[in-house]
Image (cartoon, rainbow, N blue to C red):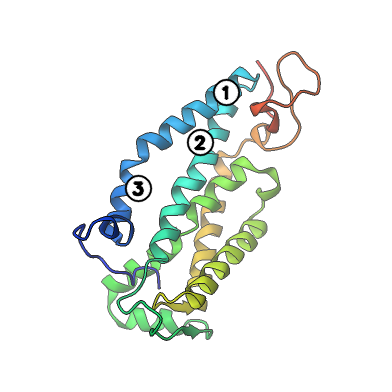
Amino acid sequence: MVLGFRRAGLAGGWHGWVGTFNGVALITVAVLPLAALAVWVLARRRRAAGTAPACAWRTSLAEVGIVYGTVPAVWMIMLPGGRDGAASPARVRLVPLQDLLAIIAAGPLTATGQIVGNLLVFAALGFLAPLRFAALASTPRILALAAGCSILVEIAQYVLPLDRVSSMDDVLLNTAGAGLAALASRRVRSPSCSTGGSRSRGGGGGRGVGADTGCPGR
């Protein structure tokens, strides 16, 4: 499950930063200003290309948010377990609800952390992808995308010597989290800002940074 990784401190050089939960969490917080700067740069370029300000900001925020909200979560669930290495046996659990029932039996605190953690892995993708790509403005498509991504992660956990469990319940929870986020984003979607036709300043068929959105120019 998602939260089964090590929570060691930052002692141990680079490994303390990139190989532990605390390290990844601190890196995620540290790069937040860079993510905000990336949103500003992308929005500015789109506005210069003729995209309406609201659409420029929304599209840029969605692009950066998908990366910022998904990469750290996937990074965390790919951290090695306590017995990582070539000698650690790969473990697979394909029976639905087997792991879920086990963590529920472990207590409410553990169950809440595990379930919420799994639901959040692809939540940013589920919420923001429909805002950026018109083709993904469909809950079934988001579910399919999240399931595919989750399966790839579970396969990677099985293939690599990480001492982690590849579980069907992880796939189900990851997919459910993305689907719930997609449903939540329906209230803030703007059809005019979805990927589609282009309308840049001055007309014509040019395609600048903002030409990949259907936002009307100013």
Residue 37 % position (x, y): 42, 30
Occupied quadrant, residue 79:
bottom left
Residue beneath the point at 48% across and 32% down: 39
Question: In this view of the protein, which residue sits in the foreground, 145 or 205?
Answer: 205
Question: In this view of the protein, which residue sits in the foreground, 72 or 213?
Answer: 72
Discs 2, 1 touching: Cβ within 8 Å: no
* Separation of marks 3 and 2 at Cα, in angstroms: 16 Å
Discs 1, 3 touching: Cβ within 8 Å: no
Position of the N terminus, as image quadrant, is bottom left
Residue beneath the point at 45% across and 62% down: 119
* Separation of marks 1 and 3 at Cα, in angstroms: 25 Å
Which residue is label 3 attached to? Answer: 28
Going by the numbered disc 3, the residue's amino acid type is: Thr
Position of the C terminus, as image quadrant, is top right
* Separation of marks 2 and 1 at Cα, in angstroms: 13 Å
Which residue is label 1 attached to? Answer: 45
Q: Residues within 10 Å of mark 3 (few under 14, many from 20)?
A: some
Going by the numbered disc 1, the residue's amino acid type is: Arg
Query: Relative to residue 55, is residue 50 depicted above or below?
Result: above
Which residue is label 2 attached to? Answer: 61
| Residue with the most extreme top position | 202
- Earlier in the chain: of badge 1 and badge 3, it is 3
Query: Relative to residue 134, is residue 15 depicted above or below?
Result: below
Residue beneath the point at 73% across and 27% down: 207
Question: What SS does tag 1 mark?
Answer: helix
Residue 47 % position (x, y): 59, 20
Q: How crowded is mark 1: few (under 14 residues within 10 Å), some or many (20 or more)?
A: some
Question: What SS does tag 3 mark?
Answer: helix
Going by the numbered disc 2, the residue's amino acid type is: Leu
What numbered label is drawn on residue 147?
A: none
